[in-house]
């Protein structure tokens, strides 16, 4: 551990650049997935445990399309549309039936969905690890000391653009306004003539589409396998819980924050502690919040 | 309606009873010796499970077509009863118990992988049923004092140790002291990879090499960029990575992305992860361990030499362009049984067990001779180097392209 710290700050400080870049690239994907989760959680109060499996499904769709010679970047709109439809379908089949029940029913239902999706992808594609070669160049700086693959830059740009589109959509469009109204008070929204069932369906479908986009990006920068969804679910939950619902800028910030924390933890303690960093971050935030809450309660008393 | 229902239930019941009574056949009945195996035909090991099953079946067909197994002057045919263990250890253990108790199987072949072998070994041990396995390489299988477990393959701590030997040989040839070699390594935190690590650490300590990076990788690995960043900063001579197919795929992708240059790069499971086709630049010069090479000159009377086995298998299964070693060693396991039955000249489980323990033979797969603990000590692990997308066997250090110079 000391060696690693020395390496970072004394011997080769230049590698900080690489680690920060990696953290940002990773964080962008986390932020995207968490954003979708925050949306569904905030608007519908459904904790979607199948979040990560939507991501992996997006990656496999890209994989299928790439077999037909379609470049992953161009398959993005197709995956987006398919996943949107899939999300809508899942809403009609499952989510609509559990949305009015208590939290545990929706947890169980989405957990079941996650298992079914994993096994289905396993049957369809087999358990092998897959990658997609985006055939994009790699840029290097400082005499190969820092390398930046074009694929990661593109994925960062795409994630950013997509997030921006959603933010604008939520602010400006009728549907976006309806979603926000429903999130604030579903009953009042219904009274004012908003078809909340449709809003829920749209929100869930939008989340699936966001995950699909994340899946396309995952497929060109990492590797995937039918059972890899859980790590995206776990991180999304940690990020959304830490950032708080309904606070979308905070979710995005926490996404990038987690990316950086993970990379530094992994640098200093070892790669196996990467996912532990996510959970520890969540723990610290929750404890800190609890302390904070206690204090303010005392003031009230 | 109700009557119909009753008739249907009665029929189902009758079928179930019939099924039970017919399946409760003895291990050796008439002129057939039935071996049993729980094998992964679905779930995460299904690909390798299938490779294993094909290796078993190929050997059974060949042995049967060449006169079968001769015991007591009578010729017997081999057959294998399979159950799908769904890649789960608990299921595999249940099925082995079922094979032994309900189906009356007296001789077992192993499942796929160390984890499943570890789950089923206590069961066959409990019933005193010999098990020859071909796919469980973990060192820990052979430290439990099992009497009935035998493995034809080399154990996992031998997987990457040859890379250290090669590095030492190259250092000596260049007039350097092997202790000046610096090693970076990253292993998944699972029993198999930690065994591999133990072998590498032993070899490195033997030469007094310095281990500059010793990272553990998580089970759901898809990003090891920080380990490779360290590698870039510390510039070790040898980089060693083991983490099953996902480790090989992640390493391939990110070594290429980060333009890692090290004189020797050795990784397990390159073939399974297809790094040679997916990362042609990064994989050039990588060393990959294998249990078996097609160019091995050793041979036996049943399959001929390695190249002949390979060619015949491809004729039987044209879908294979390269045959994985998992298949070859599965065939070798069946061959061990044939020899043992004939040497014991009996189907008594204890006698057959002793005959297996006394096995000392040359096969297309390599020499087979079991230690007291049951692992094969007569066969070394082989290294192959990827060069232009194909795998070249490294028999001595001179066969190796050194230093590895990947062009990114």
Image (cartoon, coloured by chain):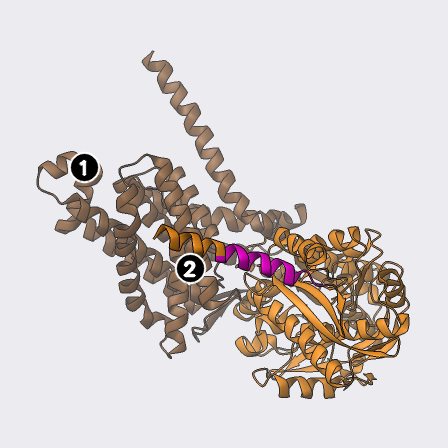
Q: Residue at x 37, y 66 (%)?
A: A154
Q: Quadrant of residue A66?
A: bottom left
Report x, y in % for residue B78.
74, 74
Please provide the residue range marked out in magenta. Answer: B11-25
Please tell me how crowded label 2 is: few (under 14), some (14-19), or many (20+) other residues with Cα within 10 Å: many
Residue B360 drawn above or below residue B308: above
In this view, the residue farthest toward the left is A192
Residue A84 drawn above or below residue B339: above
Residue carrying label 2: A56
Residue carrying label 1: A186
Residue B200 drawn above or below residue B389: above
Q: Chain of mark 2?
A: A
Dividing the image into 4 quarters, which one contains the C terminus of chain B? bottom right
Report x, y in % for residue B195.
74, 57
- Nearer-the-camera pick, B126 or B161: B126
In the rendered image, is residue A27 in sight?
no
In this view, the residue farthest toward the front is B3
Q: Label 1's element? A: helix
Q: Main secondary structure of the magenta part?
A: helix
Q: Is residue B73 left or right of residue A274?
A: right
How many angstroms separate mark 2 from mark 1 (CA)?
31 Å
- Nearer-the-camera pick, B6 or A51: B6
- Among the two numbered marks 2 and 1 on one chain, the one whose residue lies closer to the N terminus: 2
The chain drawn in brown is: A
Report how many numbered discs are placed on residues in the image: 2
Q: Quadrant of residue B217?
A: bottom right
Residue A98 in the magenta stretch? The answer is no
Q: Is residue A83 left or right of residue B25?
A: left
The chain drawn in orange is: B
């Amino acid at each position: 551990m000391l060696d690693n710290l020395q390496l970072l700050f004394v011997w080769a400080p230049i590698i900080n650049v690489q680690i920060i870049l990696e953290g940002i690239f990773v964080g962008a994907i986390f932020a995207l997935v968490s954003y979708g989760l925050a949306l569904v959680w905030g608007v519908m109060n459904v904790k979607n445990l199948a979040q990560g499996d939507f991501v992996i499904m997006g990656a496999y769709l890209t994989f299928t399309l790439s077999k037909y010679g379609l470049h992953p970047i161009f398959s993005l709109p197709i995956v987006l549309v398919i996943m949107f439809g899939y999300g809508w379908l899942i809403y009609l089949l499952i989510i609509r039936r559990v949305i009015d029940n208590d939290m545990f029913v929706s947890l169980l239902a989405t957990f079941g969905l996650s298992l079914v999706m994993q096994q289905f992808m396993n049957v369809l594609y087999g358990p092998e690890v897959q990658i997609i070669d985006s055939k994009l160049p790699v840029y290097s700086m400082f005499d190969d000391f820092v390398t930046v693959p074009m694929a990661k830059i593109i994925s960062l740009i795409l994630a950013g653009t997509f997030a921006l589109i959603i933010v604008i959509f939520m602010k400006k469009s009728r549907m976006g306004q309806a979603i926000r109204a429903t999130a604030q008070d579903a009953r009042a929204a219904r009274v004012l003539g908003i078809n909340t069932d449709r809003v829920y369906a749209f929100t869930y479908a939008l989340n699936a589409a966001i995950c699909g986009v994340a899946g396309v990006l995952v497929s060109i920068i990492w590797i995937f396998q039918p059972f890899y969804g859980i790590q995206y679910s776990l991180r999304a939950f940690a990020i959304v819980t830490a950032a708080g619902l309904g606070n979308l800028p905070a979710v995005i910030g926490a996404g990038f924050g987690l990316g950086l924390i993970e990379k530094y933890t992994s640098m200093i303690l070892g790669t196996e502690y990467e996912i532990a960093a996510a959970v520890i971050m969540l723990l610290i935030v929750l404890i800190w919040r609890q302390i904070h809450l206690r204090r303010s309660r005392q003031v009230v008393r | 309606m109700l009557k119909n229902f009753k008739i249907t239930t009665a029929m189902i019941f009758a079928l179930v009873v019939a099924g039970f009574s017919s399946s409760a056949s003895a291990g050796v009945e008439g002129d057939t010796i039935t071996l049993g195996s729980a094998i992964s035909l679905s779930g995460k090991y299904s690909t390798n499970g299938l490779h294993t099953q094909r290796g078993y079946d190929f050997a059974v067909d060949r042995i049967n077509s060449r006169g079968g197994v001769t015991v007591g002057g009578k010729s017997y045919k081999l057959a294998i009863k399979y159950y799908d263990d769904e890649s789960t250890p608990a299921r595999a253990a249940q099925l082995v118990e079922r094979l032994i108790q309900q189906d009356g199987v007296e001789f077992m072949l192993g499942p796929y992988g160390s984890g499943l072998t570890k789950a089923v070994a206590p069961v066959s041990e409990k019933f005193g049923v010999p098990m020859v396995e071909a796919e469980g390489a973990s060192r820990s299988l052979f430290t439990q004092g099992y009497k009935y477990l035998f493995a034809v393959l080399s154990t996992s701590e031998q997987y990457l140790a040859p890379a250290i030997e090669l590095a030492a040989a190259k250092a000596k040839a260049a007039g350097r002291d092997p202790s000046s070699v610096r090693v970076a390594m990253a292993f998944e935190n699972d029993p198999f990879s930690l065994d591999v690590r133990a072998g590498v650490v032993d070899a490195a300590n033997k030469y007094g090499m310095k281990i500059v990076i010793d990272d553990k990788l998580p089970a759901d690995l898809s990003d090891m960029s920080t380990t490779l960043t360290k590698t870039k900063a510390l510039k070790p001579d040898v980089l060693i990575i083991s983490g099953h197919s996902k480790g090989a795929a992640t390493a391939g992708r990110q070594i290429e992305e980060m333009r890692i240059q090290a004189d020797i790069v050795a990784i397990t499971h390159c073939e399974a992860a297809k790094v040679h086709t997916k990362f042609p630049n990064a994989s050039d010069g990588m060393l990959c361990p294998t249990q078996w090479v097609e160019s091995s000159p050793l041979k036996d009377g049943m399959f001929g030499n390695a190249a002949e086995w390979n060619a015949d298998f491809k004729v039987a299964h044209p879908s294979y362009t390269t045959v994985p070693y998992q298949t070859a060693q599965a065939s070798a396991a069946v061959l061990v049984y044939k020899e043992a039955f004939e040497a014991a000249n009996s189907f008594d489980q204890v006698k057959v067990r002793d005959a297996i323990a006394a096995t000392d033979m040359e096969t297309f797969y390599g020499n087979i001779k079991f230690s007291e603990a049951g692992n094969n000590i007569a066969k070394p692990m082989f290294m192959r180097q990827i060069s232009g997308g194909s795998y070249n066997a490294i028999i001595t250090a001179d066969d190796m392209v050194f230093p590895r110079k990947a062009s990114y």
